[in-house]
Image (cartoon, grey):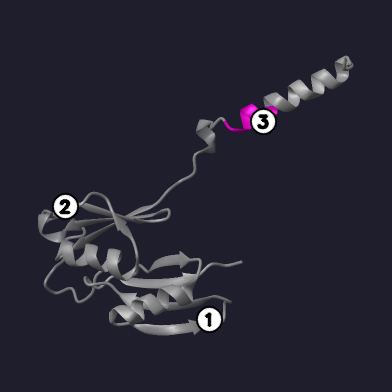
Amino acid sequence: MKLPKTYIVIIFISFLVTIFSFIKKPQDRTTSLRLELFSSNVEESVNFYTKILNFSKEGDSINQSYQQVINGSVIIGIGPEAKLSEDHFLKFKESDSRRGIGVEIVLEVDNVLTVYQQVKRSGYPIHAEINDRPWGLTDFRLIDPDGYYIRVTSRKD
C-alpha cells in the first residue's frame, strides 16, 4: 500500500519535530544557584548538611579547603572562614554576633514532615517547630553549626 505524499510529509515533519525537541539550545539553559557558606569548622558543617539534611558530598572524604554538598538542584559550597583575607567582605569579625544577617536559606522539599521527623530523630536542635503558615505552606526552621538560618518548607502546589 502506497501512502499519499501528504501523509509522508506529515510523518517526516513529525519526525523532525521530535528530533529537534531533544536538542538543547544555548537559550534553553536556566540559571542555577550555588550558595557558598564560610564555616569555622568545615567538617562539622558538611556533617550537618549530609547527616541532618540528607545532602550528599562530592568525593569520599571531606575537602577542608572547599567541599560541595548537593541535594537535588541545590548546591552548597562550604569553605573555611579562616582562609578569607582580612579585608574580604564576608570575613567574620569578633564584634559580629550572627552570620548570614539578612539571608534566609529556604530548602523546598517534597515531604516536609519526613524531613522534620528525620531532623528530630537526629537530635539536632530545631529553632522553630513545624507549623502551617498563613501563606499556605508548612515549614520548620534550623540554625546550622555556623549560625546560618535555614527554613525547610513544603513546595507550593
Mark 2 or mark 1, earlier in chain: 2
Which residue type does callout 1 highlight? Arg
Residue pictured at 57% horizontal, 77% vertical: 135
Residue pictured at 41% horizontal, 85% vertical: 129
Residues at marks 2 and 1, CA–CA distance in whole angstroms: 38 Å
Q: Mark number for residue 18?
A: 3
- Which residue bears the numbered disc 2? 63
Residue pictured at 28% horizontal, 70% vertical: 148
- Which residue bears the numbered disc 1? 133
In the displayed structure image, the side of residue 86 where residue 12 appears, left or right: right
Q: Quadrant of the C terminus?
A: bottom right
Which residue type does callout 2 highlight? Asn
- Check the image and report above or below for 155 versus 18: below
Q: Classify mark 3: helix, strand or loop.
A: helix
Q: Classify mark 1: helix, strand or loop.
A: loop
Q: Classify mark 2: helix, strand or loop.
A: loop
Q: Please check the rendered image and state whether residue 8 is part of the magenta-colored stretch, yes or no.
A: no
Report the span colored magenta: 17-22
